[in-house]
Amino acid sequence: MERDGNAWRLTDAGSAHLTRAFPGRPVTVFLTPNGCALWGLAEEAASVIDHGSVRLLLTSPPYALTTKKRYGNEVGQDYVDWLCSIIERLMPVMESNGSLVINLGDAFIRKSPTVSLYQERAIIALQDRLGLHLCQKLHWHNTSALPVPSRWVGVERVRLKSAVETLWWLSPEDRPYADNRNILQPYSDRMLELIAKGGAARSKRPSGHACREGSFSVDNGGSIAPNLFTIANSGDQSYTRSCRAAGLPPHPARMPIELASRLIKFLSRPEEVVFDPFGGSGSTARAAESLGRKWITTEALREYVEGAKLRFADELLPAAA
Ligand SMILES: C[S@@+](CC[C@H](N)C(=O)[O-])C[C@H]1O[C@@H](n2cnc3c(N)ncnc32)[C@H](O)[C@@H]1O
């Protein structure tokens, strides 16, 4: 390990010792009352998951970065083919009215302040090759994003910091299960006032939308969430502390548990199965367990599965404790 600002980073020499799963059947590393964490390759998960059982596949695969993370990634057309072939192999585990949410972030082209279109190419290929529908583009604004890519943002000052990622919501059918009432947001003060006074006066908005007399008078328990989730990626310190104490490398690209929680609530019901084929530090698993969903993860690097286990100190089933 070596110092990296306020954090610790695994050196390249250290990364070489991370233990990658072999091709073959995934191995169970730990179990909880609701879930199962497997050390294994995403592309082989369909051999151990009941077909037609997954309501929500929620995942953040490696992005097509030119500056690679320690777990590596493909780039260009190889990335598109790699992602499509994994999703194709996983499709049998999906319920037909289930959802796939694939979180991807921008990748800049090597030595250029321009952005790769790998996300768009991958999603078009998923539609063309596998017939998946694009239900909606959801976005995550990471309010604690660093000013990266540092050369273009911090040094040359010619780009804005990349702080928004896309959650591509796909489905085998065009009407998968979803209920936006599960993630209502608190009303604004203005909306609370409108409800209290019996709604808005009849009006025509500049956009052309007409408002009837008394519109917005009903209290529906909260306002409908927009397709932008604004969540800082700065919490999770107990996970990093536990990893360090156990001599494990903290995962370098974690999704906030709050983000996973909102998507799970929106796109699944209690007891249904949530699956993360690129499980990483177990953020999806942790959110699913807390929300009473069944869950399964696969992760290629054993140390990350061991780190994910630390998120479940009180819930491990005895055989795995
Ligand atoms: C972006 S990270 C996921 C982070 C995760 N969402 C979290 O919050 O911790 C991608 C993960 O996929 C894993 N991975 C890469 N290729 C894989 C494969 N073929 N099968 C399973 N896991 C893989 C990497 O080791 C890495 O941990």
Image (cartoon, rainbow, N blue to C red):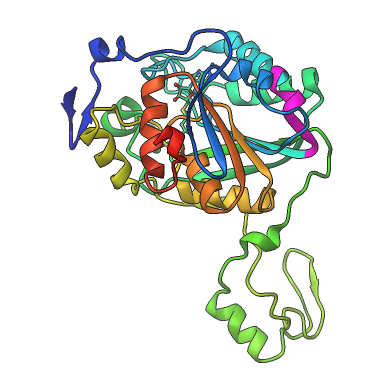
The quarter of the image holding the C terminus is top left
* Res. 76 image quadrant: top right
In this picture, residue 210 sits left or right of residue 226: right
Q: Is residue 184 above or below residue 156?
A: below
Q: Which one is in front, 129 or 89?
A: 89
Q: In the image shown, does 51 or 231 lie closer to the viewer? A: 51
Q: Residue 228, image x and y in percent?
A: 57, 51
Task: Tell me, yes or no, whether the highlighted magenta stretch contains residue 294.
Answer: no
Judge by depth and name the residue closer to the eye, 318 or 286. 318
Image vertical order of residue 129 relative to residue 136, above or below: above
94 drawn magenta: yes
Q: Residue at x 66, y 61 (%)?
A: 182
Q: Which of 225 and 160 lies nearest the eye of the viewer?
A: 225
Residue 88: quarter of image: top right
Spot occupied by residue 11 in the image (x, y as percentages of width and height)? 23, 17
User: Which residue is depicted at the point 45% across and 34% down?
Assistant: 319
Span shown in magenta: 89-97
